[in-house]
Image (cartoon, rainbow, N blue to C red):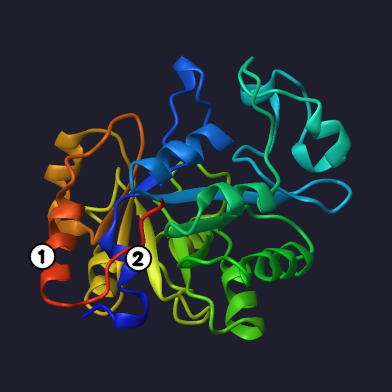
């Protein structure tokens, strides 16, 4: 059973990196993508990492090439250098985390902290920035030590483990087993699981955890996929299509029973 204090995590569908359209001038993790998600009453999943000089920015890849055409890792660039780049030849630049929070305007947030060395500074800055956010939010990461940091230093923040099969990862079988089968989730205090759509059906550990904590499914990329996997998740993180709004239908029923519903943007 999902606890009331984070039931919001399953109430409204979550737009992956905003409601983006990379081929039509609305890049992923851009301000227009976030504003479009807000306008359409979706939650937002996004990615945070830190520039060379300690500024939190919103960007998915470790390297800049795919989205900006520039070589190198994001963490090797200062924020001033990053601010001169543009996303997919549009006028959009890489947003700061603060700019993202302003654009998100109170909708539900799932914030992924990208894995990195020297855990502590990025986590503390992310935590400090989120304290003043006017809506619901949670933290997720593939790195179990990042989730553990929040358990120890900010236990009030809802936190969850991102995972998948890790079949292509250049790791030992033991490490893959620990992460894919969620063996560290109790240790790091995970309160939800976000698992890859490709293998969510066959992972017994996911179904076991779902008996007591929510499971999100990423990344759903068609209505057919959402329908086929429906029995394995409590909410979806989606992109490349807009799902049938069964979430809003359920919220309408909830509202009629005088229970909390999502705050929509003006």
Q: Nearer the viewer, residue 115 or 239?
A: 239
Ranked by sequence position, the earlier of labels 1 and 2 is: 2
Say which residue appears at 61% left-offset and 19% top-offset.
88
Judging by the rendered image, the residue that carries numbered circle 1 is: 253
Q: Quadrant of the N terminus?
A: bottom left
Q: Position of residue 51 (x, y in %)?
A: 80, 46
- For numbered disc 2, what is the local secondary structure? helix
Does residue 94 appear to the left or right of 198 in the view shown? right
Judging by the rendered image, the residue that carries numbered circle 2 is: 9
Rendering quarter of residue 31: top right
Q: Nearer the viewer, residue 161 or 42?
A: 42
Crowding at dot 2, Cα within 10 Å, few <14 / some 14-19 / many 20+, comes out as many
Say which residue appears at 79% left-offset and 64% top-offset.
118
Q: Position of residue 209 (x, y in %)?
A: 29, 73
Task: Give the vertical position of 266 relative to 2 (above or below).
Answer: above
Q: Position of residue 97 (x, y in %)?
A: 67, 51
Q: Nearer the viewer, mark 1 or mark 2?
A: 1
- For numbered disc 1, what is the local secondary structure? helix
Q: Position of residue 239 (x, y in %)?
A: 36, 36
The image shows a total of numbered marks equal to 2
Does residue 39 appear to the left or right of 74 in the view shown? left
Crowding at dot 1, Cα within 10 Å, few <14 / some 14-19 / many 20+, comes out as few
Q: Which mark is residue 8?
A: none
Say which residue appears at 36% left-offset and 75% top-offset.
6
Does residue 125 appear to the left or right of 87 in the view shown? right
| Whether label 1 touches label 2, CB < 8 Å | no
Rendering quarter of residue 220: top left
Task: Give the vertical position of 198 relative to 122 (above or below).
Answer: above
Q: Nearer the viewer, residue 186 or 158?
A: 158
Say which residue appears at 41% left-offset and 68% top-offset.
182
């Amino acid at each position: 059973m999902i606890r009331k204090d984070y039931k919001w995590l399953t109430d409204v569908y979550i737009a992956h990196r905003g409601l983006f359209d990379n081929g039509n001038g609305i890049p992923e993790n851009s301000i227009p993508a976030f504003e479009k998600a807000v306008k359409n009453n979706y939650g937002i999943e996004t990615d945070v990492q830190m520039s060379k000089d300690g500024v939190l920015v919103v960007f998915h890849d470790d390297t800049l090439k795919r989205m900006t055409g520039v070589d190198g890792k994001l963490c090797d660039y200062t924020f001033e250098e990053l601010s001169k780049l543009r996303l997919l030849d549009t006028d959009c630049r890489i947003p700061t985390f603060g700019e993202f929070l302003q654009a998100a305007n109170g909708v539900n947030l799932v914030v992924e902290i990208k894995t990195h060395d020297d855990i502590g500074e990025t986590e503390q800055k992310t935590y400090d920035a989120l304290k003043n956010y006017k809506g619901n939010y949670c933290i997720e990461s593939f790195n179990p030590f990042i989730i553990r940091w929040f358990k120890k230093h900010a236990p009030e923040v809802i936190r969850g483990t991102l995972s998948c099969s890790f079949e292509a990862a250049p790791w030992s079988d033991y490490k893959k087993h620990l992460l894919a089968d969620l063996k560290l989730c109790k240790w790091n205090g995970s309160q939800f699981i976000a698992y890859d759509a490709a293998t969510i059906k066959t992972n017994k550990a996911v179904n076991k955890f779902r008996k007591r904590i929510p499971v999100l499914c990423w990344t759903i990329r068609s209505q057919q996929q959402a329908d086929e996997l429906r029995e394995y998740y409590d909410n979806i993180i989606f992109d490349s299509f807009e799902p049938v709004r069964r979430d809003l239908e359920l919220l309408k029923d909830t509202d009629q029973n005088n229970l909390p519903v999502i705050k929509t943007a003006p």
